Image: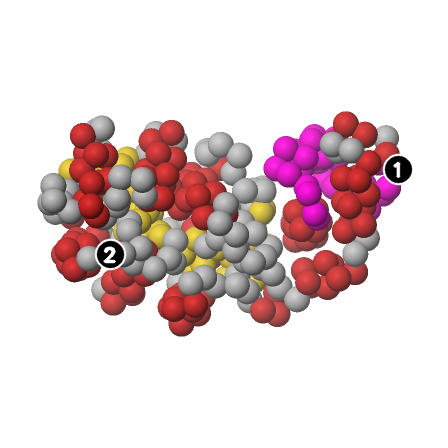
Amino acid sequence: MEEFNKKLAHLHHCKGVSWNMILSILKKDPQLKFLYNDPFYYSSPLLFKNQDSLSDTLHDLHSNRIQEQIRQYPPNGIKIISLFDEEYPVLLKETYQPPWVIYAKGNTDLLKTGTHLAVVGSRQATEYGERAIEYLFPKLIQNGVVIVSGLAAGVDAIAHKEAIKNGGKTIGVIAGGLFHIYPQSNQKLAYEMMKNHLVISEYPPNTRPSRWQFPMRNRIISGISRGTLIIQAKSKSGSLITANYAVQEGREVFAVPGSIFSAYSAGTNELIQQGAKLVKTAEDILEELIY
């Protein structure tokens, strides 16, 4: 499996190779026995949009630079987990187009143990949001809940820190690769989590974060979690994207209500109007996920 994972990761590193292209290649070559066999690709022209796309892929497949990058992941504590591994999160497999490869640094046992709860919210968290997290988390942690968030500023960072403070476990799902933590203000937190908790990404470690990756990573935050809790969110917040992914996958959605006069509660109050469970205590979450 390790050799297969390296091959799949190499394909995943190739410029312009999409999720659907990997699916098509795996259908024709499930064990990737012909990954480095050029005639295989020339005999399957429909795999690629055009000749340039094929040329780019073949160039990267024969790139010693990419192979060396992949060889350096284990010495750097980075584990390649493919969709076909036992370690791959079961709930994430059930989602639409789950990542073919996850790059993980830290305690990968956290992917398979505990009850996972996604906790997301505004990057401009207020004192109310912070107090809500401090109030809810101790009971959640006591009941084995693993906190999943996006290592962003605001609610995400507070959620990770509060989980650690209460002796719990937490998983960070980032946009970009593991070698490019964003924002820089959370680098120290990320490195602590890589040592004692877990940070994962669906992007190769050398990938710099791009704007479009942030909404995409939200599907993983909700995808590995049995429920998603929104602490604070404006009406058009990225946190609502995470909630929508959770709804699409049939997962629980929880929201902390807030003042009708606060823009940071507009999104959460709207979610409650639409059917999200209003959260006043940790029991409101636990009775849906554990009890």
Q: Label 2 crowding class (10 Å Cα cut-off): few <14, some 14-19, many 20+?
A: some
Residue sitting at x 24%, y 56% = 125
Circle 2 sits in a helix, a strand or a loop, which is it?
A: loop
Residue 15 in magenta stretch? yes
* Res. 274 in view: yes
Q: In which quarter of the image is the C terminus?
A: top left
Name the residue type under label 2: Ala
- 22 in relation to 172, above or below: above
Question: Along the line of sight, which residue is nearer the eye, 151 or 172?
Answer: 151
Q: Which of marks 1 and 2 is nearer the N terminus?
A: 1
Quadrant of res 126: bottom left
- 196 in relation to 211, above or below: below
Q: Please give the label number shown on residue 125.
A: 2
Per the rendered image, the range of residues in magenta is 14-41
Residue at mark 1: 39
Residue 256 falls left or right of residue 234: left
Nearest-to-viewer mark from 1 and 2: 2
- Coordinates of residue 206 in the picture (x, y in percent): 60, 61
Residue sitting at x 38%, y 68% = 185
Circle 1 sits in a helix, a strand or a loop, which is it?
A: helix
